[in-house]
Every structure is written in C-alpha cells, then in structure tokens.
Image: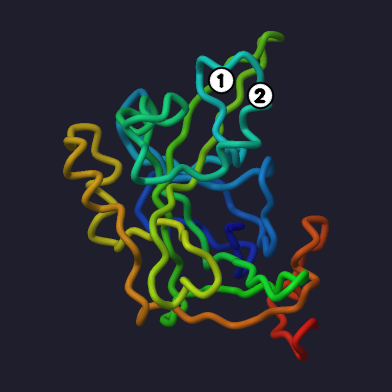
Amino acid sequence: MWPLLTGNSSRRPGELVRFDDGPVLEARYNIAPSQPIPVVRLAADNHKRECVLVRWGLIPSWAKDAGIAAHTINARAETLTEKPAFRTAFRRRRCLVPADGFYEWLKSGKAKLPHAIRPKDSHPLAFAGLWDHWQGPGGQGIDSATVVTTNANDLLRPLHERMPVILPREHYGAWLDPQRKEDELLSLLRPYPDELLTLFPVSAWVSNARHEGERCLEPATGLFA
C-alpha cells in the first residue's frame, strides 16, 4: 500500500488536524517507501502538535543499520505490542499520517492492476502511524515512520486482505495522547467503514515508483491500461 498525497501544493495538513507549525507540502501522487512522508506528532519539548517530514519505513532507535526500514513500511495492528520494531514506538511515539487516499493492486493472472482508494467526501484522511528516531554510526539522525494496518473492509478485501488504519477525526487526539492506555489505543485500530470510501482502477503508470503527477490518478481505460 502506497500513501497518496494530492491537492494544491499549498495545502497544509492543518486542514486535517490542528497543529502549531509545519511545512507547506508539495503535491505528491505516488509516494514510495524510503521517501519523505508528512506526519503530525507531539513535539517532545512542549507536547504541542507539529507536522514534520520523515522517512517512510521505520528505523527503530536500537537498529544496527537503516536496512531494517525495508521491512517496516507497515505495522500490523494485531502485533504492535509484541514486535520489537514497533512496541516502544506504539507506547511512546504515535503519529498521524495525512493523505488523500492510497493505492492497492488487484492480482489478475500474472498482472497487477492498480486501484486508487479515496474518501467519498474528498476530505483528507489520517492514517494511524508510529515514528522513531535513529542515530546512525556516522552521527546522522533519521526520523522515520510506519503506517499501521488492519484487516481489510468488505470494499477492499477483493484487492488485499489488509488496509491502513484510517482514524476518524474524533480519535486523532486519543491516538496522540501519551496518557492513553494500550487497550484503549488498540480498540481504535479497526477497518474503516466501506461506505465512506470509493475505489476505482487507475492506469498502470502509477506502478512505477519513478512516475509522479496527476497522471497517476487517471482512470484505467482498459483492463491492462
């Protein structure tokens, strides 16, 4: 699953969730693992919300090298408290990942047909995320993040068995709150209602991570467009 951030290049995630300061984001239509993604998190010094760009693919603080990030793009909600790569971040470093939707691929024989999944009301979404800070051997610091996933809803199940956890607006505060208990947080990690999303096939152009721009969202004109 690849997050999709679209819209006017002056859009701020502040339209989605209130925070004190953050970057003006460039419109993106095809964000791939290891690339920067925006996250909204609590600042360490004053617990105010901030928006920052971090690397997609979590590098735990204890990792020996950054290579682990290739395997930590997503984090299964069911094992957040068990997996060493995620359990500390789940307890202490939760974040929101703003997006306008995401892609998933339908397997058809040897082909994989991309589909875009977007909110029906066209409002931005917020994925449940985790972040961490890693200090490399050369002294360089990297902030990185992962997207939490859960079982797919009925709409997405024909494409894939998993989907990102999309948090309703009323749960943003609870997910970021450092005082919330694990059981309460885990109860938020469930499939998003089918009726709030729309799904449509798009051109295979988006299947190449080097491709960018609005063409990534063009509807497919044929079975293998």
- The quadrant of the image that shows the C terminus is bottom right
Whether residues under marks 2 and 1 lie with C-beta atoms below 8 angstroms apart, the answer is: yes
Determine which residue is flagged by label 1.
134
Could you tell me which residue is drawn at 53 percent across and 65 percent down?
A: 160
As drawn, 8 above or below 47: below
Residue named by callout 2: 66
**SS for callout 2:** helix
Instruction: Name the residue at 66% across, 57% down.
Output: 26
The amino acid type, in three-letter code, at marker 2 is: Ala
The spot of residue 168 in percent (x, y) is 30, 63
Relative height, residue 162 to residue 47 (above, below): below
Q: Position of residue 62 (x, y in %)?
A: 51, 15
Report x, y in % for residue 157: 46, 71
Q: In the rendered image of this protein, does residue 97 appear above or below residue 143?
A: below
Closest to the observer: 192 or 137? 192
Specify the amino acid type for callout 1. Answer: Trp
* Residue 92 found in image quarter: top left
Taking 218 as reference, is 116 left or right? left
- In the image, 194 versus 107, the foreground residue is 107
Q: Callout 2 environment at 10 Å: few (<14), some (14 to 19), or many (20+)?
A: some
Q: Residues within 10 Å of mark 1 (few under 14, many from 20)?
A: many
Question: Looking at the image, is mark 2 or mark 1 nearer the viewer?
Answer: 2
Q: Position of residue 65 (x, y in %)?
A: 66, 18
